[in-house]
Image (cartoon, grey):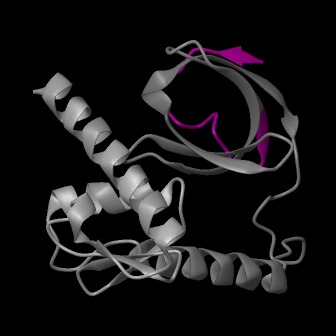
Amino acid sequence: MEGQVGGSGEEFAVGCLLSIKTTLGDEFDGQVMAFDRFTNMLGLKSGPRRNIRLLNANYIKDFSFLGQADDPLDPKKCFLDLSRLQAREHLAVRQAEADAQRIGVGVTTEAQNIFDALSKTLPVRWDKTVIVVMNEVRVSSPYLPESVSGGTAAANERVKKVLEFERKRLQARGSSQG
């Protein structure tokens, strides 16, 4: 059964397997998980990883009915691997916490840009408004090579060189955008 999408959503019964062509040129097969007539939104399970797609039915150019499958929302057949979900949640929370620690509090945009640039080549962290590099060298505001202190002489020189290079690069990038 082939069909053109009209105003009626009768064709989109839960469990239907459809081959869909969109007005944007996408083509895919999917199983109808849900259809909301009011918003004309279709929920489809597709792909080998069973991804869920939300698609406004107005964007369906053409579709073919491939068959009827079991109810995809049958609680007896649904399985959630809670330990895997909890592991993903834990990883996401740890990543968000790590990302939050990389954002300086009470620092200028320039200081954050310098921190971000340094973090690409060296291990860095914030200690209030001071950038701590390699857990020994400190870069204080105004974040110039003269603001570098602590650590061994070699580490100090390395941070100064990287800082000088990154400031020049950021300055060049800023002047080319403005």
Residue 4: x and y in percent read 57, 14
The residue under the point 43% across, 69% down is 156
Badge count: 0
Q: Give the residue at x 23% y 75%.
A: 140
| Left or right position of 176 against 21 | left
- Of 102 and 86, nearer the camera is 102
Queried whether the magenta region covers residue 2, the answer comes back as: yes
Estimate the x, y position of residue 87 in percent, counting from the top left.
75, 82
Does residue 143 lie above or below 25 as drawn? below
Horizontally, is 160 left or right of 5 in the view?
Answer: left
Quadrant in the picture for residue 63: top right
Which quarter of the figure has residue 176?
top left
Of 95 and 6, nearer the camera is: 95
- Foreground of the two, 25 or 130: 130
Q: Is residue 44 visible?
A: yes
The reply to whether residue 7 is visible in this rendering is: no
User: What segment carries the magenta color?
Assistant: 1-17
Q: Is residue 13 above or below residue 93?
A: above
> Which residue is at the far left?
178
Left or right: 36 with respect to 52? left
Q: Quadrant of the C terminus?
A: top left
Q: Is residue 48 above or below residue 173?
A: below
Q: Residue at x 51, y 53 (%)?
A: 120
- The foreground one among 32 and 120 is 120
- Residue at 28% from the left image edge and 55% from the top image edge: 113
Left/right of residue 14 with respect to residue 95 in the rendered view? right
The chief SS type of the magenta part is: loop
Q: Residue 146, percent across and down?
A: 22, 64
Magenta residue check for 115: no
Residue 3 percent coordinates (x, y)? 65, 16
Q: Quadrant of the N terminus?
A: top right
